Image (cartoon, coloured by chain):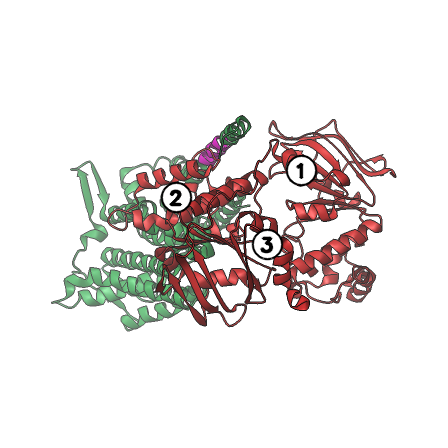
């Protein structure tokens, strides 16, 4: 192969004596897509921050770009060295136009006046090359997440970057937008850029990666070439042990059938959800699949009363229930795990203790008002043990935990209400592999104990791995349902066909 | 979930890290809670020396405590509001209106004794109206209470027909000027200060020992999450503005009892600023969700000590304004600095 564009030799980084990176050697070639994987806290973001200039590596290591040793310093250092990073949370100013964002910090001015026209012309060719369907003068606020990502990439190309680092770029994209992004990434590879692609998602790494490098506990534990990329190998490298039966499904899907717990009938909100009905039985795990924007989360919000419905009714264990607020849903026995745990779920400044007990404080309280602190502590400790939450003690603030532990804390809050029906919206988003597998076994155990569970997920292998039945939504409607049969296991193709509507073409 | 040795090792490592994190958090909380206490002590000692030993005398400390009392009560209510991420600009006006209502009632021979509850309930009423507008119509707290700052001030003037109302024989006058004797002839504490301390104590109980208290912190920490967790956010908001109004009404009663008089135009002017300053000095975050009532007490004492000390050492009225203003800015700067260290990332 040609000469490497980026070489890191023995790069380490420690914070107050704790090694976040230990002598990492990483080689990236021009014209390759290099996938970087590892559990949260494995050192991926530290590595990235060194390349962007946000952190300075410990002395002793060396970074070479195109064979020349470089020192990357300060926030602009990475860009100066030809490295651009596209972060998970995009760093665009929504109140400015596309062209202004691309030129941000390097605006063209003529005698002190901003040359908007020249800037628009300057970004034209790049946008064209990327196949953008918007104008340089468009306000970023009006763009979809996929289009915004394109602006970020355009910004990187405009800065003449040779190395592009993408951190979980598809988290906020629809399946269609992701496909377009993949095509674009391949195009950029063909144009000779080196792309470092960070992702938790195995299917993306399969689809894109020329090579995969796995980090664990700050060490580089292995690099695999394309022909060696296999899920079990990668997972073993990431967690350092065999994750036997990654997806756990021991509960008997036939056990609870015939006893419907949660039935939603003809739910609609007049916008995104257009008359959906579904039933979940006791002891059953039902997947709710569909493209992003199909209305799955919106349907869940209607069921728990988080947004107003224009039609529809609910039945719980055969009896009609009226639910107008999430509080009433919890009281009735329907709990909902939000897809956005930081914005809509956790109280990051509050302790795990308070976060876990929040929904049941009223039930536990003495005389209805006075906190029962012993009971709360006891409940939190039990939740820590039952779900394997790893934190020093229950008094640690939720914001200090890793994604997987945060998710378990949030789940504990719901389980404290002993729900009859549990709606889990993207239960493993932003959670590392080890914690994922633990969450799957928690779901499995809940199903065994008779809880009716509805899992909303965009991760198809996950849905296939843990669900008894899959309901697929498309554009606000229930597009169809697929049942797991002994003879015919669930498969991605059938689900995608329903989700995208291609089954109609086949018929 | 079977435990492999590797996992246990990882768990203990994570546990150790978390223990250290907890320790760090405790220290951070301690700094936050104690944050301004050293400043208060330094101010006290400093003024004592600068004033040639006139600060730490029984009489002067009594004056400081008495002067801090009304602001402490207002700031306690303000703490509830700011903990939810809101603001109440109308407390000064509500204080004036409550005092006017109380004094007017106290002049009626048969109902005179009811003036005290009447003043407090007047405050509660205005507070609940604020809260209802904010919680039910979803108007921004700043706008709503800016409006009531003006409107309630007008009502306060209306109540006394824009004159000063006197009542030299107002019932319960002792709460304004009397003292509770602790050791006869040696130590006593002004009733105003006793009330202020009780208010702080009750606030602490509500914030730290009740379900409602946790809900207040939750709404301030993450309102959307609170709603999804089943908390009645509207009820929490009406409650905190109600409390702020109630305490403003109590403050009005304290002022009326102290002065035997009230003027709808002058009483309580810009008291809201002192109350907000006390809360922020006390380490409560302007964004909501973080803070303590004890911090507020310290903040209110700092303001009182500052006023008293500057007078003792003969700083002119004009310069007192300048210095107090700079203290407000310094307090907000501190708030920013503190937020950086919190878990909010």
Q: Which mark is residue B43?
A: none
Residue B1, x across and y down, in percent: 48, 35
Residue lying at the far right in this picture: please name it: A2
Q: Nearer the viewer, mark 2 or mark 1?
A: 1
Q: Is residue A19 left or right of residue B329?
A: right
CB under 8 Å between discs 3 and 2: no
Chain A pictured colour: red
How many badges with numbers are in the image? 3
* Residue in front for this viewpoint, B291 or B301: B291
Query: How packed is label 1: few (under 14 Cα within 10 Å), some, or many (20 or more)?
Result: many
> To which residue does mark 2 refer?
B295
Q: Is residue A411 left or right of residue B248?
A: right
Quote the CA–CA distance across marks 2 and 1.
Answer: 52 Å
Question: Which chain has been coloured green in this picture?
Answer: B
* Residue in front for this viewpoint, A31 or A294: A294
Q: Chain of mark 1?
A: A
> To which residue does mark 1 refer?
A234
> To which residue does mark 3 refer?
A458
Q: Is residue A434 left or right of residue B260?
A: right
Q: Is residue B255 left or right of residue A391?
A: left
Residue A198, x across and y down, in percent: 68, 44
Residue B21 part of the magenta segment? yes
């Amino acid at each position: 192969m040609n000469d490497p564009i980026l070489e890191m030799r023995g790069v380490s980084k420690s914070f107050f004596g704790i090694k976040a990176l230990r002598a990492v050697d990483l080689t990236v070639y021009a014209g390759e897509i290099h996938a970087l994987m590892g559990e949260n806290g494995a050192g991926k973001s530290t590595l990235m921050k060194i390349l962007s200039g946000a952190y300075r590596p410990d002395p002793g290591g060396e970074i070479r770009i195109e064979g020349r040793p470089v020192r990357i310093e300060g926030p602009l250092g990475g860009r100066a060295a030809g490295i651009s990073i596209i972060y998970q949370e995009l760093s665009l100013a929504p109140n400015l136009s596309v062209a202004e964002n691309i030129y941000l910090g390097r605006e063209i001015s003529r005698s002190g006046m901003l040359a908007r026209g020249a800037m628009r012309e300057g970004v034209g060719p790049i946008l064209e090359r990327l196949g953008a369907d918007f104008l340089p003068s468009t306000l970023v606020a009006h763009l979809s997440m996929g289009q915004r990502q394109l602006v970020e990439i355009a910004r990187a190309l405009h800065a003449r970057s040779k190395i592009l680092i993408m951190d979980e770029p598809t988290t906020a994209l629809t399946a269609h937008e992701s496909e377009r992004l993949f095509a674009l990434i391949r195009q950029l590879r063909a144009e000779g850029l080196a792309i470092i692609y960070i992702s938790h998602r195995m299917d993306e790494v399969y689809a894109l990666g020329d090579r995969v490098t796995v980090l664990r506990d700050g060490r580089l534990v292995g690099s695999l070439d394309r022909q060696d990329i296999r899920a079990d190998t990668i997972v073993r490298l990431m967690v350092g042990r065999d994750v036997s039966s990654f997806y756990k499904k021991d509960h008997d899907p036939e056990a609870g059938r015939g006893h419907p717990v949660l039935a939603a009938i003809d739910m609609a909100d007049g916008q995104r959800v257009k008359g959906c009905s579904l039933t979940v039985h006791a002891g059953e795990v039902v997947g709710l699949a569909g493209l992003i924007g199909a209305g799955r989360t919106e349907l869940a919000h209607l069921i728990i009363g988080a947004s107003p419905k224009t039609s529809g009714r609910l039945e719980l264990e055969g009896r009609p229930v009226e639910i107008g607020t999430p509080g009433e849903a919890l009281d009735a026995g329907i709990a909902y795990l939000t897809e956005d745990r930081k914005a809509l779920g956790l109280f990051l400044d509050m302790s795990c203790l308070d976060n876990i007990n929040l929904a049941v404080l009223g039930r536990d309280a003495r005389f209805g008002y006075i906190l029962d602190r012993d009971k709360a502590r006891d409940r939190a400790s039990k939740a820590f043990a039952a779900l394997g939450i790893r934190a020093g003690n229950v008094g640690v603030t939720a914001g200090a935990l890793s994604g997987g532990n945060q998710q378990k804390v949030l789940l504990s809050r719901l389980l404290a209400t002993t729900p009859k029906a549990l709606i889990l919206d993207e239960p493993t988003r932003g959670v590392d592999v080890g914690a994922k597998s633990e969450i799957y076994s928690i779901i499995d155990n809940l199903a065994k104990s008779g809880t009716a569970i509805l899992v909303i997920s965009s991760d198809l292998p996950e849905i296939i791995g843990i669900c008894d039945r899959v309901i697929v939504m498309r554009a606000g409607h229930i597009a169809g349902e697929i049942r797991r049969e002994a003879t015919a296991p669930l498969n991605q193709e059938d689900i995608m066909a329903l989700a995208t509507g291609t089954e109609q073409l086949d018929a | 979930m079977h435990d492999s040795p590797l996992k246990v090792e990882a768990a203990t490592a994570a546990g150790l890290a978390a223990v250290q994190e907890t320790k760090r958090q405790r220290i951070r909380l301690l700094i936050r809670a104690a944050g301004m206490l050293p400043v208060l002590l330094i101010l006290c000692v400093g003024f004592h020396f600068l004033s040639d030993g006139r600060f730490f005398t029984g009489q002067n400390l009594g004056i400081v405590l008495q002067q801090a009392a009304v602001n402490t009560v207002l700031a306690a209510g303000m703490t509830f509001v700011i903990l939810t991420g809101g603001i109440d600009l109308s407390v000064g006006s509500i204080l004036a209106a409550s005092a006017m209502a109380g004094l007017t009632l106290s002049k009626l021979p048969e109902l005179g004794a009811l003036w005290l509850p009447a003043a407090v309930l007047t405050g509660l009423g205005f507070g609940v109206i604020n809260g209802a507008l904010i919680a039910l119509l979803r108007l921004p707290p700043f706008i709503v209470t800016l409006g009531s700052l003006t409107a309630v001030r007008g009502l306060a003037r209306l109540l006394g027909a824009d004159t000063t109302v006197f009542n030299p024989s107002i019932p319960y006058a002792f709460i304004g000027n009397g003292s509770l004797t602790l050791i006869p002839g040696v130590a006593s504490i002004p009733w105003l200060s006793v009330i202020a301390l009780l208010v702080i104590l009750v606030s602490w109980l509500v914030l730290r020992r009740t379900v409602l208290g946790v809900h207040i912190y939750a709404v301030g920490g993450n309102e959307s999450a609170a709603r999804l967790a089943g908390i009645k956010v509207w009820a929490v908001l009406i409650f905190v503005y109600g409390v702020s109004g109630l305490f403003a009404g109590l403050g009005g009663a304290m002022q009326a009892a102290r002065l035997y008089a009230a003027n709808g135009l002058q009483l309580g002017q810009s008291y809201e600023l002192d109350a907000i300053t006390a809360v922020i000095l006390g380490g409560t975050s302007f964004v909501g969700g973080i803070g303590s009532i004890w911090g507020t007490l310290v903040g209110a004492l700092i303001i009182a000590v500052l006023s008293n000390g500057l007078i003792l050492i003969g700083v002119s009225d004009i310069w007192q304004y300048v210095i107090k203003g700079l203290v407000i800015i310094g307090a907000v700067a501190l708030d920013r600095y503190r937020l950086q260290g919190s878990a909010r990332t």
